[in-house]
Amino acid sequence: MKTDYKKIAPQKLTFCSDYMAGAHPKVMEALNETNLMNTAGYGTDPISEHARNRIREACKAPEAEIFFLAGGTQTNATVITALLQPYQGVLSSADGHISVHEAGAVEHNGHKVLVLPFEEGKISAGSIRRYCEHYREDESWDHIVMPGMVYVTHPTEYGTLYSRREMEEIRKACDEFGLKLYLDGARLAYALASPQNDLTLADIARLCDAFYIGGTKCGALFGEAVVFPKPGTVPHFFMITKLMGALLAKGRIAGIQFDALFTDGLYEEIGRSAVEAAGQIQDAMEEKGYELLFRSPTNQIFLIMDDDEMNDLLGKVDFEYWDKYTDDSTVVRFVTSWSTTEEDVEKLISLL
Amino acid sequence: MKTDYKKIAPQKLTFCSDYMAGAHPKVMEALNETNLMNTAGYGTDPISEHARNRIREACKAPEAEIFFLAGGTQTNATVITALLQPYQGVLSSADGHISVHEAGAVEHNGHKVLVLPFEEGKISAGSIRRYCEHYREDESWDHIVMPGMVYVTHPTEYGTLYSRREMEEIRKACDEFGLKLYLDGARLAYALASPQNDLTLADIARLCDAFYIGGTKCGALFGEAVVFPKPGTVPHFFMITKLMGALLAKGRIAGIQFDALFTDGLYEEIGRSAVEAAGQIQDAMEEKGYELLFRSPTNQIFLIMDDDEMNDLLGKVDFEYWDKYTDDSTVVRFVTSWSTTEEDVEKLISLL
Amino acid sequence: MKTDYKKIAPQKLTFCSDYMAGAHPKVMEALNETNLMNTAGYGTDPISEHARNRIREACKAPEAEIFFLAGGTQTNATVITALLQPYQGVLSSADGHISVHEAGAVEHNGHKVLVLPFEEGKISAGSIRRYCEHYREDESWDHIVMPGMVYVTHPTEYGTLYSRREMEEIRKACDEFGLKLYLDGARLAYALASPQNDLTLADIARLCDAFYIGGTKCGALFGEAVVFPKPGTVPHFFMITKLMGALLAKGRIAGIQFDALFTDGLYEEIGRSAVEAAGQIQDAMEEKGYELLFRSPTNQIFLIMDDDEMNDLLGKVDFEYWDKYTDDSTVVRFVTSWSTTEEDVEKLISLL
Amino acid sequence: MKTDYKKIAPQKLTFCSDYMAGAHPKVMEALNETNLMNTAGYGTDPISEHARNRIREACKAPEAEIFFLAGGTQTNATVITALLQPYQGVLSSADGHISVHEAGAVEHNGHKVLVLPFEEGKISAGSIRRYCEHYREDESWDHIVMPGMVYVTHPTEYGTLYSRREMEEIRKACDEFGLKLYLDGARLAYALASPQNDLTLADIARLCDAFYIGGTKCGALFGEAVVFPKPGTVPHFFMITKLMGALLAKGRIAGIQFDALFTDGLYEEIGRSAVEAAGQIQDAMEEKGYELLFRSPTNQIFLIMDDDEMNDLLGKVDFEYWDKYTDDSTVVRFVTSWSTTEEDVEKLISLL
């Protein structure tokens, strides 16, 4: 008997995360339209190639090598494994996703995550430089994991943004110390759409050795597009995805979704609506006297709430515990997404 | 501008594989219906749990632990890593998928594939027993990788089937030597639907420590359902999927698909139509005087063709090179699937 | 032509480390005496077993399983790999040897080193408890590496000592959170011989799941004795040493050395002479107005020196740079060992 | 109380292996002579460098990079890990030591051993070529582990020898398919000393990307010298040895031994006496009507014995079971070494 989904999964107003709904309707439309077509497997089909061309154009990187993988942790582990030598580690913000929230996937593949201090989720060229200088000066450097690459997220875990200038500085530091630069764009749509962002896809492609354009959190059912702007950066990356269990048999399912996401500016449009919603909510919060941890430029809002107030609100809307703030207050997180409606925003504001 | 998929991916009659089309229409229907619902991530949502219950029922394994992963190689590597100790390897047919076609994913995770002889893709209890006895008798056994589990596929790489009796014998051999038993059901629908099959899902759940029910090749966009019939078989398997990069953020996307596949017998229905098509095609091949490598009970047909004939046919329909047979003949493979239509079958037959 | 070792390796007064000379003369005597005997390989010989019995007795652990490995990093990586599940990491002082100075050997084998704050090289039961409580309370705990064991060194990287009471507290914290406890005794002789030490070998065997008794830095040519006080702690550890490349073909060479080290109290005697030498040197340093970083209870001395003074002294005696202290002063390390003579001590004092 | 080694390890005539005694007396002499000298650690000392120069000269490879490791399995795993990309495997005789007797050390480090057929332990250029051609022609080659290097042993597991011409052919096949060539010389002394050998150290250095000169089985207490004839073959191999747990703190202990082994032709002298002994024994065996599996050119003798005869002889002398031959006969192995005396040989012959 057919499942009554509405019944088994009753719906409640939610701002927990940006991976709670399915795919953007235009993405679903493309999947539906192509559903009964036959194409070759493993991403070798013409639709995936079409999607790659759309991305190459958006990145102004006509020779870029592009691969579609299923999810973020998988993508990070695969790219990092591909870029590092056995004796190298990856520099990351101490609160970076790979450092904290990927269950040790990088280490499982044999590499150490080397942590840097951060401010609002961001690391700096200066801290990279200091780490590497200290490493070089250590008389026992060859008994210590060598920094081989830098991992940044944009937006960061805190929804903050690197400026173009900051990324250029980071690139410069990387060049000084022979480091690869990799950007995790799990929520990239929300960065690109932020009025405060000045780091374009073309900038990212120009500055990074590798990056990924997030699909899972930005309107796809699943899928991330790994981009190597310079061809030949990683020989046989296809085989590496296979041995990492990251190669999709029906590769086109990811390709179709990215084709739709990069049609007529949908990817940024998705980001824009979410960032605007987050702006409206933050405006309302500030008006109503709430204290933001900081004003977020993207789709993640960090709010400091009295515990009583928080528990009360949790009865009416879902959001996420982030961290203890004081003994009787807490930092909580509200996340908007492409699927957040005007109605959702209004309801939330009315509950505050 | 919206992509004209028909134009960029012109369609041709094809029997190359069972992962060339999208998802069964009822699977797409469920994805469309639930698309804008919000649910928790990582497979913790009620729809995924509903799907698990449907699978538990189909397997007559009410306490089974079930996880949805993205693809076959990933699933094999994750389950094998979870079941083995560092000093153990996995016994497999020498032509097993993990042994030959997964780019060394098992070895990448630290384990050796120990190969057994096979007949039409099948290994036997006898060969397992001989391997283990030989291992035990070796004076240097503790310098040699210890067999820790057995890997079988059903149907096999050759589309052949284990009988219930053969699997019971294999289970017995496993018990004698302390081996875990794992069944790769990438194409399980096509086995379950074969008139020659007497190994039910409930048998598999009774006999195996772990198995997976294939989605990717059996009507889903992607996704495999890992089943541990006995709870507690692998503590913290969830974490292992995470560190292997095999945990889907929107876990429900796989859950919804399996919910649809296990509604009203869809999974076996999918298999049945493909197996019937393969039967019709084999009948026609035999009638027309072609030589089958053997009569296949499932959806993969292995045909011996003169090279000239083969090259001629390849101009009209796509199928796969399998192996050289003699100097001027070749074994080729035709695969049907849930998406093979009556019309496809007729066209192929008319071309033979 | 025979090498003139004295000529190619001119000798200078040195306090750089405790692995700069060969083996204690009594160890060499045992190696010489047994040299032409034939015995079975891989540590299965009767001399290695004799040595194990001597160690069992010294540890008051009659059922202990004992293995002889070649060096410290190898030993740490092997024991940690053997004790952890794939989803677990090892808690260590942030300056622990495995965290900093083993080139990522733990990560190469798939595990994360989880760092704790330290004081004079020591971690505390409190910090273990806080880490684990924080882990348990995290809503995303199953996306985060699970602490599976605690790694301590005794003496620490700073030559400091855990008291019996501190270790009992640490054991208690481990029990509360299901953690294994492992002690790295690379310099254990110098701890056991310290007047300030109250943690005996029997205490260590009672409190730890595994530990190693250092040979390389304590009078052997090479070799570390891994002790699992409770039999069955790690099934097939022998095989794990083999696959880690840590199994010695002529296992007895390590066994003989440990047999000598545990004959007539040689192991503690070796420690005692070095600790006494370090005491004399520290007395002299204090008398002469030097500032110790702290008074060391074992064989490593940490001294704060003006850079000019330091550079001057380096012309006459070798010692090690440790860390910058202020802009024009440095922390340096002097290490004594079993091979430090009265004459060496006097010379050094005269140079201060 | 000092151990009475003679008492706890009673001696019996033995031909079980070549790692049953300590070190050649001249090696022990060098260790004794240098014992109380102080030198820097990790193989950076002048004695190790002196030994490297002796080896460079013997190999006619003045720029070779040389590292001293502790044992064979460790050396194989470290060199193979260093030479391969993540998606590559190592071609080896199906009975190669890495394939069968190293407990999966290569797989533990992430690589598959790809097996080739062998004759008397030897693989051929032809079989390498066939494997690689088959790989290149496979349409799914990028789903299959790529052969990245060839592993040979000289002498082989069966004590047989590659001729210079055979090795040149193998090198040629490697060049055709972009493979690295690595030679495991665990018993190299016994090859170099064989009258049938025409493959010199200089040939090996000219033909291989890497090889190791065995110490453990050729007169050292332990130790293998890894040689990369061309500098820069593996960047940062030192760090790789460290993270593999293969770096010796007192590196000079291995260096001193190799210095002695390469003084005044000792290494070949060691081999010569053993090969001569094996020759005498084989002469006697043939004279007395025994059936050799084949006439061995080095120090391992393979004899076919009736089981009754074998059991009888085992009461008087130790040798090794190798393999079942027929229902009532067995292949057994006798091994001579540098420590086999004239008296041992005579005793054995008298017992036959």
Image: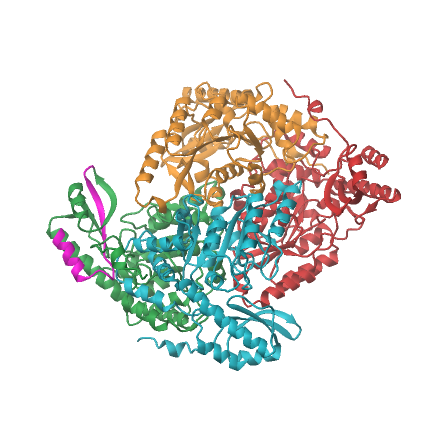
Chain colours: A orange, B red, C green, D cyan
Residue A352 appears in the figure:
no
Magenta range is C327-352
Instruction: State left or right for residue D290 relative to residue D244.
Output: right
Q: Residue furthest left?
A: C288
Residue D2 is situated, as x and y percent measured from the top left of the image, at 31, 75
- Up the image or down, A175 lies above or below C4; here it is above
- Up the image or down, D65 lies above or below B263; here it is below
Instruction: State left or right for residue B239 relative to residue A130.
Output: right
Identify the residue at horizontal 59%, vertical 24% (top origin).
A53
Instruction: State left or right for residue C9 relative to residue B82.
Output: left
- Up the image or down, A65 lies above or below D209; here it is above
Q: Is residue C328 magenta?
A: yes
Q: Is residue C340 magenta?
A: yes
Quadrant where the N terminus of chain C sits is bottom left
Residue B289 is situated, as x and y percent measured from the top left of the image, at 87, 44
Q: Quadrant of residue B144?
A: bottom right
Q: Residue furthest right?
A: B287
Closer to the camera in the image, B103 or A156: B103
Identify the residue at horizontal 38%, vertical 56% (top origin).
C182
Identify the residue at horizontal 50%, vertical 64% (top origin).
D194
Residue C308 is situated, as x and y percent measured from the top left of the image, at 16, 41
Residue C33 is situated, as x and y percent measured from the top left of the image, at 34, 73
Residue B51 appears in the figure:
yes
Q: Quadrant of residue A310?
A: top left
